[in-house]
Structures are given as structure tokens and as C-alpha cells.
Image: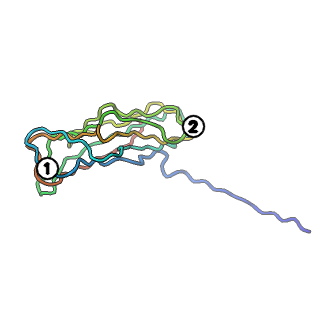
Amino acid sequence: LADTTSTTSIGFVAAASPLTLDLVPSFNFGTGHAVPASDTVYTMTGTDASSVQVTDNRGLTALRAWTVTEQLGKFSPDSGVTTSLTGATLSLTAGISRQVGGLGVAVPVASPLIAMASGGSPVNVVTTVNVLSITGGVFQASWQPEVIKLSVLGGTASVGTHVATINWTLSTD
């Protein structure tokens, strides 16, 4: 009888990005509203929570701070007018932060009041400070529909659907 040998191997590659913004919400405030003559506040439609999710797999380190910001663009209607809902504000309150995966020690904090003016500057949505994570983590901040509001100034709306882009940015601090 003869002895036979074989080999075994394994290869590893770096993750595409060790810090990623995985999930951002869209907000729908319904259709069929009368054009408001006075200032009006609309509540988001639906029953599901809106969430922001970040995955942090940067390895073992004590300084893992990051921030998610959002910037609400200007609204434009489908009626051909160039801009609409001037001065509109999107607000989120009472966000709930949690870690949904990994072995992190600290959980990010959702800003208690987020108010974005249409066409305004970016605002902080979720921030971390010195999050220690042994194997990385998946973090979420969520808002229930009843705490997501769109404030529209009277005289700024026209008939039609009005849409604005929200730019979400994940950055390290």
C-alpha cells in the first residue's frame, strides 16, 4: 500500500467597505389632500417603521464614531412648476436606536428632534461616540409613522404630486 497526500486551502478577501449605510427610508404622506390655504401638518401614511441602518465592520478599535446626516432637497410638483412647498419642513421625533447584530458595547443615538427644511442644510440623524465593537455591528434607528411629519406653509402648494430628494450621508468623525 502507498501513502497519498492532499492539500487544502482557504482564501480571504477584504470586505467591499467596512462601514456602510445599508438602509434609508422613503416617506409618503398620501394623496388626495385638498390644496391647503393655511399652514398644515401631515403625518406619514402606513404602519411600518422607517429605519436607517449602518453596518460597521472596521475591526477592533475604541474609536468608531460615525454620523448619518440627511438633507431634504427642494420639492417639485409634477405640474410643470419649477418649485413648490417653499418653506416645508420634514420632522422626525422619538427615534429608537438599537444594535441588531454584532457584539458592540454602545448603541448609536438617534437625534431626539430632526427638522429638515426643504432645500436646507444637512442635519444629524444618528451619531455614535466611541463605539467599541469586537466583531462589528449592525445598528438601526427607527421612527414610527405617527412621529414623522411634513409641515406645509399655506399658499405654497399646487394641485399634483410633490416630490423631494433626500440625500443621506454616512461619515466618520
Q: Residue 117 placed where, x, y %? A: 21, 39
Q: CA distance from mark 2 to mark 1?
A: 48 Å
Q: Earlier in the sequence, mark 2 or mark 1?
A: 1
Closest to the observer: 166 or 91? 91
> SS class of the residue under badge 1?
loop
Residue assigned mark 1? 83
Q: What residue is drawn where x is 49% and y is 41%? A: 100
Residue furthest to the bottom in view is 1
- The amino acid beneath tag 2 is Ile
Q: Residue 151 placed where, x, y %? A: 19, 39
Closest to the observer: 40 or 137? 40
Query: Where is the C terminus found, in terms of image quarters?
Result: top left
- The amino acid beneath tag 1 is Thr
Residue assigned mark 2? 134
Q: What residue is drawn where x is 54% and y is 41%? A: 102
Q: Residue 66 placed where, x, y %? A: 42, 37
166 lies above or below 130? below
Badge number at residue 59: none
Q: Residues within 10 Å of mark 1 (few under 14, many from 20)?
A: some
Relative side of 129 to 124, left or right: right
Q: Residues within 10 Å of mark 2 (few under 14, many from 20)?
A: some
Residue furthest to the right in view is 1
Q: How many marks?
A: 2
Q: Residue 124 placed where, x, y %? A: 33, 36
